[in-house]
C-alpha cells in the first residue's frame, strides 16, 4: 500500500556558538534566530494552517525554534512530540521517524548535517543546502510503510533571507 505524507522539514534557527565547558544540547537561539523562526512560522502558518503535528529534537535550540514557529497558531498550536532520537540524528533515524509519523501535514525540526542528507535522500539532485531556519515542503511517499530513496516530491522551500 502506498501513502503520502506532507512533511515540512526544518533546521533549527541560528543558535549561539558552543562555548568551552557548555553542552551543545543546551545552546539557545540568538535573538536573530528567534526572529527568523517566528517569521518562518508565519510563512508556514499561511502555507499549512492545518498542520497536524510537530516532531522535534529536544535540544534547547530546537525547542526554542518550535516555540517561535508555533506562536503563529496562537491558542491552538499543533501538538509537539519531543524525540531524543532526533538530536543530531543521522539519516537512518530521520527516515525511520518519517516512516512512523501518524499525522500530516507535519513539521520535523532537527539538525544538520542529518536534515540536509534527508532532503537529498527524499529528493535527489540539485544542490539544496539547509541553512538555519530553512523549511523544505516535501510530499513523502511510502510503500508498505517504507520510504525509498527518491520517495519525495519537493513542493517548495523557504528560508528567512527570502521572506
Image (cartoon, rainbow, N blue to C red):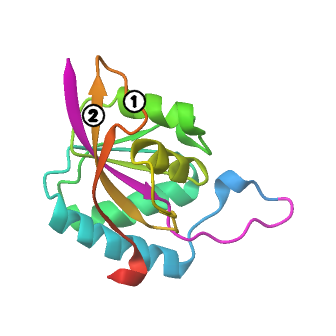
Please report the bounds of the magenta region as a residue range. Answer: 1-21
Q: State the image quarter where residue 45 is shown.
A: bottom left
Q: Is residue 140 above or below residue 22?
A: above
Are circles 1 and 2 on residues that touch, CB within 8 Å? yes
The image's mark for residue 141 is 2
Q: Is residue 31 left or right of residue 124?
A: right
The residue lying furthest to the front in this view is 125
At mark 2, the secondary structure is: strand
Q: Position of residue 71 (x, y in %)?
A: 28, 65
- The answer, for residue 74, to whether it is visible in the render is no
Q: Is residue 89 above or below residue 93?
A: below
Q: Is residue 9 left or right of residue 120?
A: left
Q: Nearer the viewer, residue 102 or 35?
A: 102
- For marks 1 and 2, give the CA distance: 8 Å
For the point 29% across and 28% down, which residue is it?
A: 142
Q: Residues within 10 Å of mark 1 (few under 14, many from 20)?
A: some
Please tell me whether residue 48 belongs to the stretch shown in magenta.
no
Q: Position of residue 126 (x, y in %)?
A: 45, 60
The number of discs equals 2
Q: Nearer the viewer, residue 108 or 77?
A: 108
For the point 57% across and 76% down, which residue is it?
A: 30
Q: Is residue 7 left or right of residue 115?
A: left
For the N terminus, which image quadrant? top left
Q: Residues within 10 Å of mark 2 (few under 14, many from 20)?
A: many
Q: Which residue is mark 1?
A: 148
The image's mark for residue 18 is none
- The answer, for residue 47, to whether it is visible in the render is yes
Q: Position of residue 99 (x, y in %)?
A: 37, 28
For the C terminus, which image quadrant? bottom left
For the point 50% across and 75% down, which residue is it?
A: 33
Amino acid at each position: 500500500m502506498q501513502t503520502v505524507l506532507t512533511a515540512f522539514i526544518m533546521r533549527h534557527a541560528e543558535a549561539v556558538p558552543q562555548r568551552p565547558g557548555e553542552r551543545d544540547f543546551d545552546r539557545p537561539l540568538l535573538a536573530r534566530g528567534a526572529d527568523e523562526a517566528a517569521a518562518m512560522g508565519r510563512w508556514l502558518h499561511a502555507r499549512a494552517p492545518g498542520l497536524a503535528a510537530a516532531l522535534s529534537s529536544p535540544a534547547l535550540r530546537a525547542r526554542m525554534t518550535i516555540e517561535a514557529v508555533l506562536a503563529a497558531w496562537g491558542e491552538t498550536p499543533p501538538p509537539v512530540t519531543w524525540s531524543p532520537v532526533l538530536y543530531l540524528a543521522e539519516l537512518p533515524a530521520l527516515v525511520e521517524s518519517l516512516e512512523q509519523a501518524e499525522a500530516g501535514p507535519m513539521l520535523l525540526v532537527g539538525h544538520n548535517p542529518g536534515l540536509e542528507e534527508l532532503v537529498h535522500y527524499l529528493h535527489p539532485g540539485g544542490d539544496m543546502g539547509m541553512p538555519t531556519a530553512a523549511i523544505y515542503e516535501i510530499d513523502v511517499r511510502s510503500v508498505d510503510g517504507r520510504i525509498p530513496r527518491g520517495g519525495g516530491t519537493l513542493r517548495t522551500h523557504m528560508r528567512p533571507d527570502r521572506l
